[in-house]
């Protein structure tokens, strides 16, 4: 699984494999028709409806490969951990570029 910059699992909602940090064999790339990555757009071409991760995964499945999440990967970055407001809450994280002074 790939952890996004907001600290959440990439593609947790749709179950796709996030391509931010992926390993793919040369054999697979040779059998998947290029382009390997592209965004899906709305009919009028003005809005991105799906990222290039889903595009790649669909093309891989069509070529007979089935991408799977096989571990966790993320980035080591400085964060500020904010304690919970009450005992039933959990800690929150703020990435330094997103930190604002109230």
Image (spheres, rainbow, N blue to C red):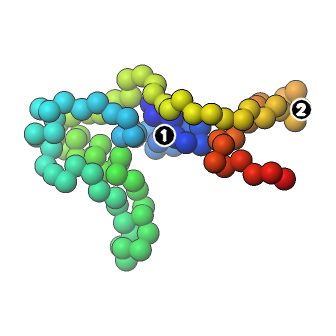
Q: Is residue 9 left or right of residue 67?
A: right
Q: Is residue 78 left or right of residue 83?
A: left
Classify residue 44 by image quadrant.
bottom left
Camera-side residue of 27 and 49: 27
Callouts 1 and 2 close, C-beta under 8 Å: no
Residue 89 visible, this orientation: no
Q: Is residue 43 left or right of residue 95?
A: left
Name the residue located 52 percent from the left edge and 40 percent from the top edge.
4
Near mark 2 (Cα within 10 A), the count class, few <14, some 14-19 or many ≥20, is: few
Name the residue located 34 percent from the left edge and 51 percent from the top edge.
52
**Quadrant assignment for the N terminus:** top left
Camera-side residue of 98 and 65: 98
Describe the element under mark 2 as helix, strand or loop: loop
Name the residue located 21 percent from the left edge and 34 percent from the top edge.
65
Q: Which residue is mark 1?
A: 10
Residue 29 lies, in percent from the top left, at 16, 39
Rendered position, 69 above or below 6: above
The numbered dot on residue 86 is 2
Describe the element under mark 1 as helix, strand or loop: loop
Residue at the farthest right position: 86
Q: Upstream in the sequence, badge 1 or badge 2?
A: 1
């Amino acid at each position: 699984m790939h952890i996004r910059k907001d600290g959440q699992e990439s593609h947790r909602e749709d179950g796709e494999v996030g391509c931010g940090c992926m390993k793919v064999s040369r054999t697979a790339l040779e059998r998947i028709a290029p382009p390997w990555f592209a965004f899906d757009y709305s009919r009028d071409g003005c809005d991105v409806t799906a990222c290039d991760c889903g595009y790649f995964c669909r093309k891989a499945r069509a070529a007979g490969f089935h991408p799977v999440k096989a571990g966790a990967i993320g980035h080591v970055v400085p964060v500020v951990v904010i304690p919970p407001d009450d005992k039933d809450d959990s800690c929150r994280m703020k990435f330094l570029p997103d930190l604002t002074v109230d």
